[in-house]
């Protein structure tokens, strides 16, 4: 069987199935999620079924599989927030052992040995190289049987028709039997400024950093303000310092920053709460065995029978705080669940000034690097991370009673800071920049004050990502919701899909995976294939729909 590759089209020259008889599938977006769909199809459909498929991949990025977030051409200053040992594209089941040769660490051993150890937070560009190589393997395997085409274009419209779906891009409109949408952030976009009585200053979103944070746009010595103090803001700060040849030198407890004189004179960071991102623990922290967590996992899963009626604080959060207290007691401290909950309530309900935020970051850095004993923030973060698969299963698909959603959603936002913060190395760098006064943090009483303060800066940046439910105006997802093709969950705002990712009310011919469903589906981590089985379920469901024509 021979294949000819021309203009990114892969056409099998020996297939006998006519194009009119093929089952036509469109995959819109090919970052990690789109790649996972391709791989699941190639593995779970039979050779005969694959030979009946015509697959069109719509992905404008130059390296399918990586998408925009893991673009291999981006700066190596932009690091992962996920340690190397947890990245394995080919692993779809937690009960199956990983084959080192297929994991990210195995790939690094061969291609970038300097990064090939556990507990590394490698550049996102390097992970993009790995994902694109995975794509190349999957695409080659698919092309042995299916008719496949990659269109490097942006889809402008998707519409339901009497016979399936029509998809239009810049060049033409085509018709398909089945459509999969995995557009993630719909492009990496910034969140809108909330309503304000003050005229909004001109803000630039920080991505793509190569253009938005260039020396032409932000000259050396200029004063910069950044809205937001999350992971995106940390990316921007490090690009404007380390990315401009500033150097961090190891010190006894914290690194020191040596400026290059190409960075801004000062970076002012504005945050509504002042609460910072806390450091992820390193390998220097004593690991906790899985046996310790098992009773808490089982206690959570005992509540599964009450799915749809769960009370977040009583049924879920209490177990998290109990696990956190037990972890601290195991380390020789004396805590009860109530002590942990009291600390969290204090964290949640009070704004932090700059000095308090710095102390919280510094304490988390020392704990994460093994310089101080475990404390309550560490214990809550570790408990949330270790129990997360059970939380995802319990809360997803409308698991909470409606009155509990707001409490969960606030907790989820805070856990982004406490449990899913940046690597300790990045926190150490930010602390160094705070100490050298290259970065200054500000907490503001309201959005009007935020905007007024930013007007004093020469360059103003928005480092707040659009929320999962903040669809691009007139974009694909917004149009599908407006026309009633897909539905939002009225409580969480996420798009409603079934356990196979198929849109509610549709007969299984439209699937949506990833960030757009967040709230209905919990924890859309693009690099994890074991947290959810949606894509596996989808491919199995697809196998029941693809019926090959019989030869006469």
Image (tube, grey):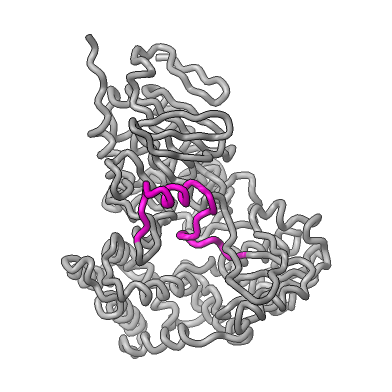
Residue 119 appears anywhere in the view: no
- Return the residue found at the far top: 552
Give the total number of marks visible in the rendering.
Answer: 0
Image location (x, y in percent) of residue 202? 72, 64
Residue 500 % position (x, y): 29, 47
Q: To which quarter of the image does residue 392 belong? A: bottom left
Q: Is residue 497 left or right of residue 418?
A: left
**Above or below, 10 relative to 246:** above
Query: Could you say which is closer to the camera, residue 257 or residue 371?
Result: 257
| Left or right relative to 225: residue 15 | left
Q: Is residue 246 above or below residue 207?
A: below
Residue plotted at (39% across, 53% down): 528
Q: Magenta region's main secondary structure?
A: loop
Q: Is residue 382 left or right of residue 308?
A: right
For the record, the magenta segment spans: 463-489
Q: Residue placed at 50% from the left, 17% from the top?
A: 4
Please provide percent x and percent y for residue 121: 53, 58
Picture quarter with the N terminus = top left
Taking the image as shown, residue 355 lies to the left or right of residue 453, namely left
Task: Using the rendered image of the protein, determine whether residue 38 is visible from the camera's viewpoint.
Answer: yes
Position of residue 495 measured from the top left corner of the image (x, y, whole percent): 38, 55
Decide: is 396 above or below 101: below
């Amino acid at each position: 069987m021979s294949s000819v590759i021309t203009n990114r089209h892969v056409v099998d020259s020996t297939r006998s199935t006519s194009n009119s008889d093929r089952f036509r599938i469109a995959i819109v977006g090919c970052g990690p999620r789109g790649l996972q769909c391709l791989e699941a199809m190639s593995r779970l459909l039979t050779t005969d079924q694959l030979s009946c498929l015509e697959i069109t991949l719509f992905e404008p990025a130059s390296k399918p599989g990586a998408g925009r977030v893991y673009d291999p051409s981006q700066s190596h200053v932009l690091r992962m927030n996920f340690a190397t040992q947890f990245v394995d594209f080919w692993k779809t089941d937690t009960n199956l052992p990983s084959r080192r040769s297929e994991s990210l660490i195995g790939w690094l051993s061969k291609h970038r040995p300097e990064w090939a150890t556990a507990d590394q937070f490698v550049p996102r560009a390097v992970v993009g190289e790995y994902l694109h190589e995975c794509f190349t393997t999957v695409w080659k395997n698919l092309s042995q049987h299916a008719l496949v085409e990659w269109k490097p274009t942006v889809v402008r419209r998707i519409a339901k028709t009497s016979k399936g779906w029509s998809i239009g891009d810049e060049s033409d409109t085509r018709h398909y039997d089945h459509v999969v949408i995995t557009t993630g952030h719909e492009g990496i976009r910034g969140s809108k400024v909330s309503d304000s009585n003050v005229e909004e200053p001109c803000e630039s979103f920080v991505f793509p950093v190569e253009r938005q944070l260039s020396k032409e746009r932000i000259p050396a010595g200029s004063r910069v303000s950044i809205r937001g103090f999350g992971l995106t803001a940390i990316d921007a700060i490090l690009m404007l310092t380390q990315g401009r040849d500033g150097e961090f030198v190891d010190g006894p407890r914290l690194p020191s920053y040596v400026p290059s004189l190409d960075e801004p004179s000062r970076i002012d960071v504005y945050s509504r709460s002042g609460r910072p991102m806390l450091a992820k623990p390193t390998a220097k922290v004593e690991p906790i065995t899985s046996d310790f967590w098992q009773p808490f996992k089982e206690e959570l899963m005992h509540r599964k029978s009450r799915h749809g009626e769960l009370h977040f604080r009583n049924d879920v959060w209490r177990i998290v705080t109990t696990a956190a207290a037990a972890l601290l007691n195991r380390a020789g401290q004396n805590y009860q669940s109530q002590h942990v909950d009291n600390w969290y309530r204090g964290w949640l309900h009070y704004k932090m000034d700059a000095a308090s935020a710095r102390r919280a970051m510094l304490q988390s850095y020392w704990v994460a690097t093994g310089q101080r004993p475990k404390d309550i923030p560490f214990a809550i973060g570790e408990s949330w991370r270790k129990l997360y698969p059970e939380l995802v299963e319990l809360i997803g698909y409308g698991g909470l009673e409606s009155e509990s959603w707001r409490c969960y959603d606030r907790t989820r936002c805070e856990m982004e800071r406490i449990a899913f913060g940046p690597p300790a190395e990045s926190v150490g760098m930010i602390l160094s920049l705070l100490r050298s006064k290259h970065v200054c943090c500000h907490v503001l009483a309201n959005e009007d004050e935020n905007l007024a303060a930013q007007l004093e800066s020469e360059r103003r940046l928005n480092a707040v990502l659009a929320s999962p439910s903040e669809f691009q105006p007139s974009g694909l997802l917004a149009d599908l919701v407006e026309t009633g093709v897909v539905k939002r969950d009225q409580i969480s705002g996420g798009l409603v899909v079934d356990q196979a990712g198929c849109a509610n009310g549709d007969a299984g011919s439209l699937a949506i995976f990833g960030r757009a469903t967040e709230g209905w589906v919990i924890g859309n981590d693009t690099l994890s294939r074991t947290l959810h089985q949606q894509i596996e379920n989808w491919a199995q469901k697809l196998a029941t729909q693809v019926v090959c024509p019989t030869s006469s």
